[in-house]
Amino acid sequence: NRLVSHQQPTAKSAMFRATRFLRRVLRSDSAATAASADGLMFRFNTPSSSIIDNKPIKMVLVPAVSGDFGILQGHVPTIAQLKPGVVSVYETDNDITHYFVSGGFAVVREDATASVTAAEAVEVSELDPAAVQAGISQYTNEIASAKSEEEKTNAEIALEVHQAMEYALTMAK
């Protein structure tokens, strides 16, 4: 059977694998050491703007579909889809900025860097509470009066986003 080799590994192939493993460990250790001096290197982007561009931060909290989680330096590599919610960027323990995102992705890389790419993002302080409440009423009514599954689904998505904005407003107080 050509697919499975029952030969013993040669000393040369074992040395090659060990060298490749050692290089990977040293590369990730040196990146982690460089990042640890300044914190987690972080980028936060939307399709139209760069909100934070390779800046050292202490931590970021993200609203993932699989559950909210925090990213610190040394976090395992991860890719997570974001749901509508709040991304909290901790530059220090006392310097925290909350952003509302409508969705997107968070990526943590092996080199001790992380990024959030969101479809839309706005500082929570810029949300208009009256507009959020009006949207909740509007989309609740649209769900009740939907004439097709597509209309109902679109209204449910919009309602979910507005409810997440409402929650963001309460947590930012």
Image (cartoon, helix red, strand yellow):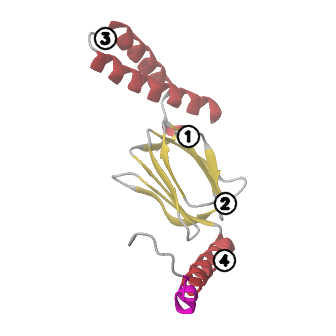
Secondary structure at numbered mark 1: loop
Camera-side mark, 1 or 2? 1
The residue under label 2 is 58
Is residue 117 shown left or right of residue 78? left
Tag 1: residue type? Answer: Ser
Q: Specify which label sits upstream in the sequence, 1 or 2.
A: 2
Of mark 4 and mark 2, the one earlier in the sequence is 4
How far is mark 1 from mark 3, CA to CA? 29 Å
Q: Position of residue 64 (x, y in %)?
A: 54, 42
Residue 13 drawn above or below residue 43: below
Main secondary structure of the magenta stretch:
helix
**Image quarter hosting the N terminus:** bottom left
> Which is more foreground, mark 3 or mark 2?
3
Under circle 3, the secondary element is loop
* Along the line of sight, the residue nearer the viewer: 108 or 57: 108
The residue beneath circle 4 is 33
Q: Nearer the viewer, residue 67 or 136?
A: 67
Return the residue nearer the eye: 33 or 41.
Answer: 33
Q: Earlier in the sequence, mark 3 or mark 2?
A: 2
The amino acid on which the numbered mark 4 sits, given as a three-letter code, is: Thr
Mark 3 lies on residue: 146
* Stretch of the chain drawn in magenta: 8-16
Task: Tell me how far mark 4 sits from mark 2, CA to CA.
Answer: 15 Å
The residue located at (33%, 24%) in the rendering is 154
Instruction: Classify 10 Å Cα crowding around label 2: few (below 14), some (14-19), many (20 and above).
Output: many
What amino acid is labelled 3 in the image? Ala
CA–CA distance in space, label 4 to label 1: 30 Å
- Picture quadrant where residue 41 is located: bottom right
Q: Sequence-wise, which precedes: disc 3 or disc 4? A: 4
